[in-house]
Amino acid sequence: MQKKGLMLGGLAALFIAGGALAAGPADLNAGMRSLMDRYLSEAQKKEPSLKAFSAEEGKKFFNAKRMHSTAKEERSCSTCHTSNPLNPGKTPVGKTIEPMAHSANKDRFTDPQKVEKWFKRNCAWVLERECTPEEKGDFITYMMSN
Amino acid sequence: MKVRVWDIPTRLFHWSLVAAFAGAFFTSGTEWFLEYHTVFGYIALGLVVFRILWGFAGNRYARFSDFVGGWRRVRDYLRQAATLKPPRYLGHNPAVGWVVLFMLIMTVSLVATGIITYSGEEGRGFWAGLITRDTGIFFREIHDFLAALALAVIVIHVSAALFHDFILKENIILSMVTGTKEDPATWSERVGHMRPVDRPSSLRLVALIFAAILIGLGVRFLPPQERKIRFTGEVSEQVKVVTPKGYTARIKPDPKWKEECSPCHNAFHPTLLPAASWKRIMDGLNNHFGEDVSLDPATRREILDYLVSSSAERSTTEASKKLLASIKKGEVPLKITGIPYWRDKHSEISADVFKRKSVGSEANCLACHPGAAVGSFEDKDVHVPD
């Protein structure tokens, strides 16, 4: 009995991991999926045990506050995008940002170049470094999940 | 004996139209006096509409029926004028009759094409928002042509008047001031032209009431005022500049500029900073007010070229001129909001207003200036949100 349950669970885990490995979140287009594949293989070089990205981790990353070394203010991704990805955000200058969640804005996460450009900018602004492939993968998975 | 020929409305009309034309002529060709130029145009239109009514209602010599005759009369008259012995007319002679009619039609066309140009190109005036920019540009060509034609007709008209005064010794220019003609040599002929009584008609009353209403409207609306721009469609989105050769031109907004320079703030209009400032900003994109906005070299070049082609030096707007004038020699500002003229104009707005949720910062021009995206910052359009 227990053995059978374990086996089923293992199969299910394999199936989910396999699905994520092959495609990333289902709604992504081909270009974005290959970007996600790249993130995953790069992340696995550092951490071979990593099987798939996690929306849960993405959410934590999105809301994590960090003190900026020169600006002396707490910054996070949610500073501009607000803590709810379904809502529109605002830049420090005052311009509205369309919602980040794919379900609220179909244009999001459709252009790998644009995504990379903004990761570069916004990670530097918040974290004063580049984001790791794992952080990026988790972030996108979170944005695709709500 | 003096004979009354030109009634007071006709004389007033004549010299007012002269003044309106002179005013329009001296305010043409430059953006600076455009508001005044249009005012002279509207005045001319009002005058001409009145004159057309007066052409049916005025006294005998003011009426079209008196001076607009057939081609044969014109031909005979011109033939005799060529021999310096034309018959004398108390009112308009057959030739000038047609010139008068032509000038009335020409003035109406000139003003109509002017209004279309103004509405299309500037997004201002009667039909602002209804006429596309391209239509405006097309009608400017017609407007320019009609203006040249008007000048030619005026030259002919003035030459003819001088001819009558100095060669034929008819004192006609002064008669348009005094309203009377005094010329013993032709006196008997004149009497033959006169009708014993000039019957006033009810149309005359209508024309005079109309004139009174026009004057009232004129006093109320004509002092130059910035009419509200309607920012619709493509109207005035393209930047108006003066090219290095001195021509005015329209520059299309660069799509890369729109894409790359508008996500964080609404793209600042190129006419708001001098070329040197744009160069400095585009050279420092890797640290752009704390942001890394690095672009690939081709995109950077394209955006810089656009910004320089429409920079404050090239711009025709008052805001550009004043911003530029206030920058100290040798300084290359990175911020529009740091330029003395900007600081001066916004000195009465408290810091709290800029921090409001609906505004965000000083750099969010669009929050208070609905025309910011097309480089328009007219006082009349300003609206500070709550």
Image (cartoon, coloured by chain):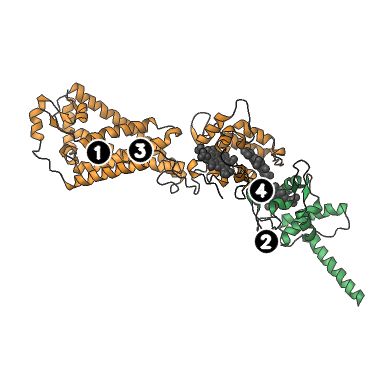
Mark found first going from the N terminus, 3 or 1: 3
Distance from the alpha carbon under mark 3 to that under mark 4: 47 Å
**Disc 3 to disc 1: CB gap under 8 Å:** no
Q: Determine the chain carrying the residue at label 3.
A: B
Distance from the alpha carbon under mark 2 to that under mark 4: 21 Å
Give the residue displayed 8% in from the left and 34% down from the top.
B192
Colour in which the image shows chain A? green
Residue B298 lies, in percent from the top left, at: 67, 38
Mark found first going from the N terminus, 2 or 4: 4
Task: Give the position of the N terminus of chain B as an image quadrant.
Answer: top left
> Can you see residue B375?
no
Q: Which chain is orange?
A: B
Could you say whether the residue bearing mark 4 is in a helix, strand or loop? loop
Give the residue displayed 19% in from the left and 47% down from the top.
B203
* Pair 3/4: label in front: 4
Q: Residue flagged by tag 3: what amino acid is it?
A: Gly
Q: Which mark is residue B41?
A: 3
Check disc 2 and report the residue beneath it.
A103
Residue B367 lies, in percent from the top left, at: 57, 47
> Can you see residue B208?
yes
Picture quadrant where residue B46 is located: top left
* Pair 2/4: label in front: 4
Residue B60 lies, in percent from the top left, at: 15, 39
Q: Which mark is residue B101?
A: 1
